[in-house]
Every structure is written in C-alpha cells, then in structure tokens.
Image: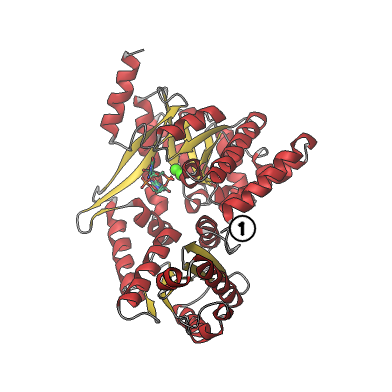
Amino acid sequence: MVSAWSTIFGFRKFITRKDSHIKQSARINALEHLANTDALTGLPNRRNLYSTVQEYINRGTGEIAVVIIDIDNFKVINDTLGHISGDALIVSFSGFLGKHCHGENIVARVSGDEFALVFPDCSVESALQLCNGIRSDLHRIDSLDHLDKAVSRVTASMGIAMYPYDGLICEDLIKHADSAMYNVKKSGKNNIAIYNRSVHSLLEEQQDIVHELALAIERNELYYEVQPIYDSTGSKILKAEMLMRWNSKKLGRISPAQFIPLAESSGLIIQMGWWILNQGCLLSALVPDIKICVNISVAQLIYPGFMDRVNEILKQSSALPSSLALEITETFILQNNPIIAAVMDEIYGAGLDIIIDDFGVGYSNCDRLKKLPIACIKIDKVFVDSLLGSAIDQAYTKEIIGSLVRLGKTGDFTITAEGIEVLSQLEDLRELGCHSIQGYLLAKPMLPAKFIDIVQESYLAG
Ligand code: C2E
Ligand code: CA
Ligand code: CA
C-alpha cells in the first residue's frame, strides 16, 4: 500500500545506505506501520486511506467509488454483549470486507464500526453492484458464532460517493459517502444509497463554472491574495505565496479548491497562470527583499515554450529572476518525466527558484531530491498536522522532518512548512530546523495592499 508516509520509502534507501542510520530506519519502519494501521483490525487507518486515495487521484485512475459502510445497531451489540464481543464483530467484519476487495481496492477502518471501501477505476453502476454483493453476503460473517443468539443477523448501511463528481479530494468523498450512508440509516438501515447529486447535474454545474471562468480574466473577476512566509522565529517575512481568487459576477466567490482543478482540466489554467505570474512580477518590484512564490500547474509547465514566456513576462515587468520562486507540486516534479526534468533545468538556469509544493502527499523518492535543481521543499499541511496527533504520529513526523532538514543540508535546499495553525507546531518545527513557516498562526492570505503595508512597516522598524 502506498501512503503519504511512503515518502519514507525514498528515505529508507537514503538512510540505510549509511550504516549509522540503520537503527533510525528500523524505527521509522515501525513508526510508519503504526501510524498507518488500525490497531484492532490491522486495516489501513483513515490517514492511510486519505493518502492512498490521493495517490489514485494524482495518478489519474478515472472514476473512483468511495463507499462508507456502517454496521447497523452496533452500539446495541456493544452495549448488550460487551466490548469484547463488539471487537470480535469488528474484526470479523473487517475480514469479511477484505474478501470483497481485490487488487487495488482498499478497505480501511475510519472509526468505530465505520469502514471505507475504495474502488478505483469503477463506475457508479459497478460500485452499486459490488455493494449489493456485499449486502447479500453479510449473513456469512463468521463472528456470529461468538456472539449471543440475540444477534442473529448482521446488517449494514452503505453510502457511495464518486470521484470526480462528488468531490475532488478524499475528505469530501468520505464526507459525501457518509451523508448518503446516514440517509440510509434514517430511512430504515440495511440498504445502499448513492450521494444525493446526480452525476449529470454535477457535470452541468462544472461546465457552467468552466464557461464563466473562461470569461473571468477579461471581466477582471480574477484577483489574488498573498500569504507571507516567515523565518522560523516567526518574526521576519522571507517569502510570500501568490494565491489566486475568483469573485464571479454570476456565480459569486468560488474557492480555488473548486476552480483550479477545473481550470486545469479545461486548459484555462495556462492563461490564468501567465496572469498571476505577471502579477507576481509586478508585486516583487514593490517588496524587493521578499521572494515571491507563484504556483505553477503541470499543464503550464509542459506547455511548449514555457521558459520563453516566463522570460518575456520577467522582461516586460523588469522583475529579477532571483526575486521569484515557482511552486510545483511534488507528484509531478518527482515523476522522472524527461520533459518536466528539462523544464526544471531551464528554470534553474534562468535563475528562478523551484519549490516542491505539497511535499508528503505523493510518493517521492527522496534519493532523487538531492539531484534535482530545487531551492526549497514545502511540507504539506497534512504532514504538519500530524504534529498535533498521537504520540506515534508526532514521533514519526518529527523523524521525517528532521531527516528532510538533514537531507536539505547536503542537497542545498531549505525546508518550509505550511498550514501552521498552532504555536506548538511552530515550536516543534523550529526545533527540528525548519527554515521557514507559512500558516494562519502567523498570517492568513491577504490582499496585496495590506501585504505591502506590512512589509513596509517592517522595513521602517528596521
Ligand atoms: P497550495 O498551493 O497548497 O496553497 C496553500 C493553501 O493553504 C492556500 O489555500 C492557503 O490559503 C492555505 N493555507 C495556508 N495556511 C493555512 C493554514 O494555516 N490553515 C489552513 N487550513 N489553510 C492554510 P487556497 O488559497 O485555498 O488555495 C488552494 C490551492 O489552490 C493551492 O494550494 C493551490 O494548489 C491552488 N492555487 C491557488 N492559487 C493558485 C495559482 O495561482 N495557480 C495554481 N496553479 N494553483 C493555485
Ligand atoms: Ca503552493
Ligand atoms: Ca501547498
């Protein structure tokens, strides 16, 4: 199983090559296993599920069915027969679901008696068929022998959500599958429901958004916010990330999580990307000591003549290449794709920094990191959030970030952590040697005028 934590696979190679790090590698292995596994059933846990689904999405597996399945009346079983019987049922149920999942299908335990099934490359009709198969097979669950005669039959309620129609990230898909499952519970249990919205109406809605987006640039509906990135003490602004915003006259404010993927799939991101790069160049002239970071989608990166266009924009705005950094998502940068590798060399050759964005979400081979022309790795929020998790999560995350910081020293790149919301995260990251910090704790994204004010105030304060 590949997980967000499988970033570590690359590390493992890196570390084991150095004998002195063998123990560390074994510890990381053990922590990795604990951090990704549900202790009772041995199934992947929620985090493991999120990262594997994200991997399928990144890989472009097509439609993905996410099913939430919840044992009916489990609380009653648990309360009347006791936790030991309840646990026995959970274990048998997980074994039963495992028998229905083959190949790349996933079964994971998401909470108490709630499980998730994931079927990649699966239509809604096939998902329904699979769920029906599970439903009619439920009587085979073998734990009934250990349970009291009071439980003569185990039934379950199921909800199905489909990628990409019902959500573009695992969290939304689970949420929607869950809400479909709750509808089943409300209407008598022991059944299957598909998330409310019909595939057709969702597609229509998306087409509408794309249509409006195509007009957004001309209509001046696009604007941007900037989020400062501070040094590890949280006092000095080193960089700032440009974040695109869209206030549609027809559809209202739409979040980038919704419009960026649609801009990418429709190709509009290329034009939008040039627009924001140009805005970044103009902003950089006003905040000369601060590196301006611009997100670049892979469609834009592999666009023929990418670097020529970047150079043209730099020239027109008189911005220095060294004042800009381009953020490229980990999944694409480390794919070993010759076109992307060549563009990265061109970017580096032109004097712009490359930042690996969302690090930890994909499955990087960290051996490769040292060979790439990168200036910085930005550790994803999901990763940083684990600093607030269980003791195992924390230990594991600290081990990884510490190793990344050490790797950065030999590979000559720095480490930024993003999504820092809590002081203890900042303290942990500083202790681990992270160079820069981005997150609501220090500053939320803001309009450029406010950002310029803050920077100028800091210049005055010396
Ligand atoms: P990203 O590149 O990972 O950007 C960071 C996201 O995290 C931003 O969300 C930012 O507002 C949010 N964030 C920062 N600190 C915190 C925190 O402490 N807590 C929480 N909960 N969130 C925090 P935003 O602005 O909604 O952007 C979402 C994504 O949309 C970006 O993720 C990026 O992938 C994409 N995006 C935004 N602007 C552009 C752009 O100009 N070009 C491209 N290609 N993608 C963009
Ligand atoms: Ca980014
Ligand atoms: Ca990011």
Residue 10's place in the image compared with 78, above or below, is above
Q: Is residue 441 left or right of residue 389?
A: left
Number of residues whose C-alpha sits closer than 10 Å to that of mark 1, classed few (under 14), some (14–19) or many (20 or more):
some
Residue type, mark 1 in image: Val
Residue bearing mark 1: 2
Q: Nearer the viewer, residue 160 or 80?
A: 80
Tell me the residue at 61%/48% (across/down).
7
Q: Taking 180 as reference, is 447 above or below it?
A: above
* Residue sticking out furthest to the left: 249
In the current view of this chain or complex, which residue is farthest to the right? Answer: 19
Quarter of the image for residue 319 reads top left
Q: Quadrant of residue 461?
A: top left
Q: Position of residue 342 (x, y in %)?
A: 62, 45
Residue 457 x/y as whole percent: 30, 19
- Residue at horizontal 53 percent and vertical 64 percent from the top: 60
Judged left or right of residue 218, residue 437 is right
Please say whether residue 206 is visible from this viewpoint. Answer: yes
Q: Give the answer, above or below, for where 77 lies relative to 235.
A: below
Residue 174 placed where, x, y %?
42, 64
Q: Secondary structure at mark 1?
A: loop
- Please state which of residues 430 and 158 is positioned toward the viewer in this rendering: 158
Is residue 364 something one can see in this rendering?
A: no
Q: Residue at x 50, y 58 (%)?
A: 46
Find residue 28 and report its horizontal and vertical position in percent: 66, 44
Q: Is 219 on the left or on the right of 132, as rendered?
A: left
Displayed quadrant of residue 448: top left
